[in-house]
Image (tube, rainbow, N blue to C red):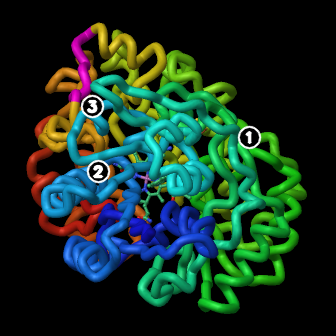
Amino acid sequence: MKVILYYPRNADRRLSRLPLSVLALGAVLETKYQYHIVDGNIDPDPLSTIRSLIIGGDRDILLAVSVMPGTQMVNAIRHSRQLKREFPDLTIVWGGYFPSMHPESVLNSSYVDFVIRGQGEQPLVALLERRGSKSALADVPNLSYCVENEFIHNRELPLFNPNDRPLLPYHRIDMNRYTIRTFIGNRTFSHESSVGCPHKCNFCGVVDVFHSRWRAETPERTHEVVRILKHRYGMEGIEFHDSDFFVSQQRVQELSELLVDEKIAWWAEGRVDTLLNYDATTWETMKRSGLRMIFFGAESGMDESLKMMDKGGVTVEKTKQIAALCAKYDVQPEFSFVMGSHPTKTREEIDATIRLIYELVDINPRAVIHPFIYTPVPFGTIYEKAVDGGLAYPKDLDGWERREWRQYTLRRRPHTPWLTKSLYRRIINFRAVLESYRPKLNDRPLPQWRVFLLKLFSSWRYHSRFFWCAYEVRLLLHLLRRPARPEGGF
Ligand code: B12
Ligand code: SF4
């Protein structure tokens, strides 16, 4: 039996991050099964590579596809459909955020046999062990499948301890293809040092998939990974791709102490309220250990909206405080917003968020701003209001492949009934002016002349806060800018 772990393309090929999900799955297959990793971010023709692995092998093959929303979902749909057509006996299983949130619409499509929800390591091994017998499928945890038009969703396992996972099998991929240049180093890699998130923000996919659970590697284990990446693969910087890296101050303090001597730079995502509670010693140790940037979910400039989103202790005031604290320790903050979340006071919320963004960049001129559009995930009060107003997800993958839903998964068309066309335009016009006047800290910086032109044309709008009909700025951005994040897209 052979397993093909497929990571469909989801990013600009020149900015490929490590495909951590399939590496994590490979780690538990390593000594038990024959397997191959195919990464669409590196391989220009993954479909042909998969075909040759199927044709050249013993035909008893499981294709395990990792699917996050967006471009990856679309490539996963197209390639799974095509491969099932060519090889009807091929077993296809999907895992990752998209199928975990929408298992039934995935299974409604004739080309995906199984979905594994949430963490995949143990369930995938269990599926491989029991695959021969239909009755044994009931014992495969986290598995969703369809029997005679009825969906079956097996029980979910408690979170798997990341310290029990064997180290990632980096030797299975060409690590040189993943040494990207970012703002934190010439050879930047990524790692996830903790799984899930203990919080319950009701617009966040992590809650729907990990149900407010969180488990972390020990500082020693993460340090070991850093040492491998640094000494074996020449790493200079690391992005910790944890959903919430800073949950435990003690863990971060101990890890930072271990990292001081490694002389690397690092980046991670955290919460405003958590980091405000960190003491000065930890901030200083983090800085000494190479912390360069923290990505915060600020979400909104309106406290009422933050409450509706269940953001816990995050408030507008605290977001301003953290911007100042980051300036004090010379750590660059990134603030992400999801504009347009309030179902009734939508315009007020958007304008309050715009005002907060102006204040944040005054407090900390190095702040990087990511203004996304609020896009519901399938649970929580705001989602329910959107459903009452007409939001209805597609019933199958052919529906998800349609442009309007592709755009939804990329958070570009939220399908929230309260976001009228004119409010939507207000957000994108504001965003264009902001991004032109204050270019984001891109992974690949723009040449100076482009920055100059963008600033020149957007300056009066930025200062007068006049965003209406900013077509000239949007056109210029379209012509001159490279994508700020390595997302590719449609
Ligand atoms: C790194 C990252 C990216 C990188 C991807 C880098 C790469 N290697 O290509 C980039 C920047 C490209 C990216 C982009 C986007 N991302 Co992103 N990303 C992440 C992040 C931070 C880490 C993902 C990761 O590697 N995790 C580590 C691995 C080990 O965990 P995992 O992927 O969950 O895999 C486990 C399970 O899910 C499961 N599993 C996964 N695949 C499979 C397959 C099988 C067969 C099985 C059995 C199991 C299984 O088992 C794995 C091991 O336990 C996550 C947040 C997070 N911490 O997970 C967000 C996250 C996945 N991204 C998200 C989003 C929304 C996006 C974007 C759509 C955002 C946007 N519009 O800007 C884009 C889409 C891009 C595109 N064009 O398609 C959301 C998804 C939630 C949702 N709403 O559905 C997340 C959760 C962030 C968030 N909190 O909202 N992202
Ligand atoms: S803190 Fe961040 S990762 Fe955790 S639930 Fe809230 S938005 Fe999601």
Residues in magenta, as a range: 389-395
Q: Quadrant of residue 342?
A: top left
Front disc: 1 or 3: 3
Cα distance between the residues tagged 1 and 3: 29 Å
Name the foreground residue: 123 vs 312: 123
Callout 2 amino acid: Met
Front disc: 3 or 2: 2
Looking at the image, tell me whether mark 3 or mark 2 is earlier in sequence order. 2
Callout 3 amino acid: Pro
Label 3: element kind: loop
What residue is drawn where x is 63% and y is 44%? 196
Instruction: Check residue 73 in the rendering and tell me which mark sits there, or answer none.
Output: 2
What residue is drawn where x is 54% and y is 39%? 142
| Residue 1 position (above or below residue 358) | below
- Asked whether the beta carbons under mark 3 and mark 2 sit within 8 Å of each other, the answer is no
How far across and how far down the image is residue 307, in percent? 56, 18
Front disc: 2 or 1: 2
Whether residue 394 appears in magenta in the rendering, the answer is yes
Cα distance between the residues tagged 3 and 2: 17 Å
Label 1: element kind: helix
| Residue marked by disc 3 | 414
Name the foreground residue: 228 vs 141: 141
How far across and how far down the image is residue 66, in percent? 40, 56
| Residue marked by disc 1 | 274
Quadrant where the image shows the C terminus: bottom left
How far across and how far down the image is residue 211, in percent? 61, 31
Callout 1 amino acid: Thr
Cα distance between the residues tagged 2 and 1: 33 Å
